[in-house]
DNA sequence: GGAATGATAGTCT
DNA sequence: GACTATCATTCCG
């Protein structure tokens, strides 16, 4: 490319894309074998990759929530296995995508061994690559504020064109999948732990994990000191 | 800046 | 028939 303007940001993009094009950093199913709270913390700082045509849409996970198995009243698995939630009872490292409030999709990753329920909700990303395409998918102007693109579970699914029909049950550990989670070796800063958002049952449990002070976290438009960092 | 509210459809009782 | 792991808009201060 012509590289008239090379900012630190675009260097991060270059690095992420080259990682994405190789198989480096692919996470194995073993990554997801542990309980949801362990996996939820472990996923913060990893890359979510969406291959759309020839383009990579990439975001770094900055916020997750753990949903336990049949002991967690807030979890979809609580009422037992149904056709809707069967993915979270299946093998680890698969996408569980559901439609909510008649408007939005949410992306989860199954964890625990096959037969045991548990998953992690991906709540927010920091957009890394493909921002113009993300904005178009979100029906926003191409120069929209990056934090408007993926700062919430419904938003990030819209920005990455993730739908139940195409992605539910997809293996996120397969380098050939058009939706994957990988590691580029990045180590996030301090990870804060808080109660989960938007639920009415078991809402006191500290099962939400996010990068402290990160402005791409959901609902943090102003409560983070001036929205810096 | 911050709280309240309506939209909208799949899933379960 | 009643929910809901949300978002954008509208209003109020």
Image (cartoon, coloured by chain):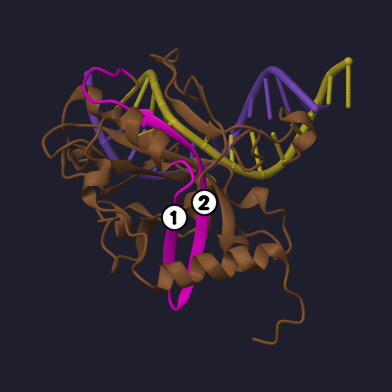
Chain colours: A brown, B purple, C yellow
Q: Is A140 displayed left or right of B9 in the figure?
A: right
The label number, if any, that marks residue A48 in the structure image? 1
Residue B12: name its quadrant: top left
Can I make out residue A130 in this image? no
At 35% from the left edge and 66% from the top edge, which residue is drawn?
A178
- Chain ID at mark 1: A
Label 2, label 1: how many angstroms apart (C-alpha)? 6 Å
- Check the picture and name the quadrant holding the N terminus of chain A: bottom right
- Chain ID at mark 2: A
Q: Which residues are magenta?
A: A44-73
Which callout, 2 or 1, points at the residue further toward the start of the chain? 1
Location of residue A86 in the rendering, given as x and y in whole percent from the top left corner: 18, 40
Location of residue A123 in the rendering, given as x and y in whole percent from the top left corner: 49, 39
Can I make out residue A143 in this image? yes
Secondary structure under the numbered disc 2 in the rendered image: strand
For this rendering, which residue is in front, A158 or A6?
A: A6
Above or below, comparing residue A21 to residue A170 in the picture: below
């Amino acid at each position: 490319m012509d590289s008239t303007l090379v900012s630190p940001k675009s260097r991060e993009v270059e690095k992420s894309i080259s990682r994405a094009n190789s198989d480096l950093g692919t996470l194995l199913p073993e990554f997801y074998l542990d309980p949801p709270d362990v996996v939820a913390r472990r996923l913060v700082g990893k890359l979510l990759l969406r291959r759309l045509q020839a383009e990579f849409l990439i975001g770094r996970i900055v916020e997750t929530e753990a949903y336990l198995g049949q002991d967690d009243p807030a979890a979809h698995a609580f009422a037992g296995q149904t056709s809707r939630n069967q993915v979270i009872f299946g093998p680890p490292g698969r996408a569980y995508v559901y439609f909510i409030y008649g408007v939005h999709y949410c992306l989860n990753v199954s964890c625990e061994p096959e037969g045991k329920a548990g998953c992690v909700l991906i709540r927010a990303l920091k957009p890394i690559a493909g921002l113009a395409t993300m904005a178009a998918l979100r029906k926003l102007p191409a120069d929209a504020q990056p934090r408007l693109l993926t700062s919430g579970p419904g938003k990030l699914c819209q920005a990455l064109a993730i739908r139940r029909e195409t992605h539910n049950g997809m293996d996120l550990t397969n380098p050939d999948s058009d939706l994957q989670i990988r590691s580029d070796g990045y180590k996030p800063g301090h990870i804060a732990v808080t109660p989960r958002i938007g639920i009415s049952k078991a809402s006191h449990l500290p099962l939400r994990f996010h990068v402290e002070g990160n402005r791409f976290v959901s609902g943090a438009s102003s409560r983070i000191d001036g929205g810096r960092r």
